[in-house]
Amino acid sequence: MTLAPESNPKIQDTPPFRIPLSEADRAFLAGLGATLRRYAPHETIMRQGDDEGRAFIIHSGWSCVHTDLPDGERQIIDFPFSGDIIGLRAYQSPSYISLTSITKLIVFEVPAKALTAAVEHSPRLAGTFLSVAARQRAILVEHLTNVGRRRGAARAAHLLLEIGTRLGGDGQRLASHYECPLTQYDLADALGMTAIHINRILKDLRELDLLSFRHRTVDFINLPATKKFAGFNPSYLLLERI
Amino acid sequence: MTLAPESNPKIQDTPPFRIPLSEADRAFLAGLGATLRRYAPHETIMRQGDDEGRAFIIHSGWSCVHTDLPDGERQIIDFPFSGDIIGLRAYQSPSYISLTSITKLIVFEVPAKALTAAVEHSPRLAGTFLSVAARQRAILVEHLTNVGRRRGAARAAHLLLEIGTRLGGDGQRLASHYECPLTQYDLADALGMTAIHINRILKDLRELDLLSFRHRTVDFINLPATKKFAGFNPSYLLLERI
DNA sequence: CGTTCCCTTGAGATCCGTCAATATTAGTGG
DNA sequence: CCACTAATATTGACGGATCTCAAGGGAACG
């Protein structure tokens, strides 16, 4: 079910939900008017405050959902991955978040009205949306816990563990190594710190032989120790079971 | 639509949604097996990690949704109010949050299965749930922004402004004064700080003539200045319009 | 009317932010 | 492939914000 666009240049035209959909749901979604869109790195796809009638489903690539503050700062809420839905809402309303691409990004753009229609057409699909929303909420809750209650080093380690796990796909297998295009500025905005301090924290984590994040690559040097250090328990990432 | 339990001792037996429901939806919900439950202050209603098949809709009273950390600390995610739904999920699954009463609390307890059934029975209700979930998500996003990107004093002021606004009900009218049973420990756990520091921050806010929080009472001394100081923009609290 | 929370304050340590400067890397165009 | 440029990463010094430890004081509640 998970797409592997890199190995398959012909892009599949149904959303990459990680939760099984019936063929009927699939066909209905395809008929909703979902548009496949490609964005270059560092493009603004949706801006906080705009009256927004679209929702997005990530197909592939890295991006961030964030809020913008008056002083020009931002808080990154999440780095959504394949199958995640952004802007799920019942009705058109002003967006309270922005969506910005980090790498080249491919998304399905769906009119919000179409989502409402989909929910009304297919109870099965409504359940799927509820389920996806519940998982995204669990992730958001964990981010708040991370920023509010862990100190810098554990906070950074926790985020990198989470991303590694989410990249593992359905199996949620956490690899000891992954490519990560985030900058230290991105990490800082996600973790509620400054990039300068993130830099020092990453240095500490290397010197503690826990993990290394350099040259766009995360290497877990000692995975069990890192999990313990960060208080990482991946249960919140598990999908709801049917 | 908003209930006023204090002025009406006979408790209404339908959930206090702030979004209009059709009579049919209402009747269906009533038939779902929703149970009205009362809790004393400081009771644990739902505990993180437990396999949970219930959802709750707040009727009246104060409570907090929080995560629990291994070291005994907690991060408060939200103080839900009348009409807010806790544990909305498509299927039974382990809970990633705890729910604890702060004052005497009255809630509707609904089996998760019943929620799924409700969504499948009534597209209208599915839309309502989506809408409630979207608002709660907006609040959670604002909490993450608050903890991640505002300094202590502004962070505390922002939370107290949000609570005041949410207490205003549908009109979202922010009164210059409200009763607030939260302790400084509660505030600290919600804001990602220590109670000792919250104490100093509240002192600062008083001395800045912005607001006073003493003896379970919040007084906004200079509301416009406080809003500006906290960067408070209540648009995220507005309900989605149909 | 006493006991238990809860609030308040001080001193010192630690974490983190700010300012500043430089090094390194990635991206671009020739 | 190289040279150039912009973005990103790194480090130091210093100051402010927040935490920890410690000790009382006050309010709420039975």
Image (tube, coloured by chain):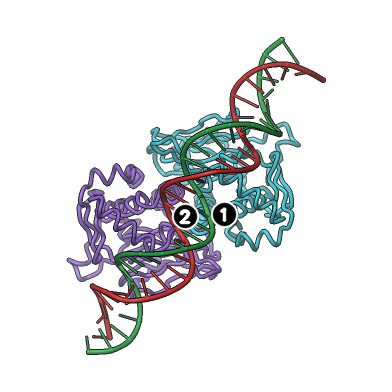
Chain colours: A cyan, B purple, C green, D red
Mark 2: give few (<14), some (14-19) or many (20+) Cα within 10 Å. Answer: many
Q: Nearer the viewer, residue A70 or B237?
A: A70
Q: Position of residue C9 (x, y in %)?
A: 31, 64
Image: B84 above or below B123 = below
Residue at image position (62%, 40%) is A182
Image: C4 above or below B236 = below
Q: Which mark is residue B177?
A: none
> Horizontally, is B52 left or right of A224 in the view?
left
Comparing marks 1 and 2, which lies closer to the viewer?
1
Image: A86 above or below B181 = above
User: Which residue does the numbered mark 1 point to in the structure image?
Assistant: A155
Q: Does the image show residue A199?
A: yes
Chain identity of mark 2: B
Q: Residue furthest left?
A: B7
Q: Which mark is residue B120?
A: 2
Secondary-structure class at tag 1: helix
Chain identity of mark 1: A
Tell me which amino acid carries mark 1: Arg
Q: Nearer the viewer, residue A167 or A185?
A: A185
Q: Pick the quarter of the image with the N terminus of chain B.
A: bottom left
Q: Position of residue A91 (x, y in %)?
A: 39, 41
Tell me which amino acid carries mark 2: Glu
Q: Nearer the viewer, residue B144 or B1?
A: B144
Q: Position of residue B220 (x, y in %)?
A: 22, 52
> Horizontally, is A137 left or right of A181 in the view?
left
Q: Does the image show residue B126?
A: no
Q: Pick the quarter of the image with the C terminus of chain B.
A: top left
Which quarter of the picture shows residue B85? Answer: bottom left
Q: Position of residue A57 (x, y in %)?
A: 56, 40
> Horizontally, is A168 left or right of A47 in the view?
right
Q: Measure the C-alpha gap from mark 1 to mark 2.
A: 40 Å
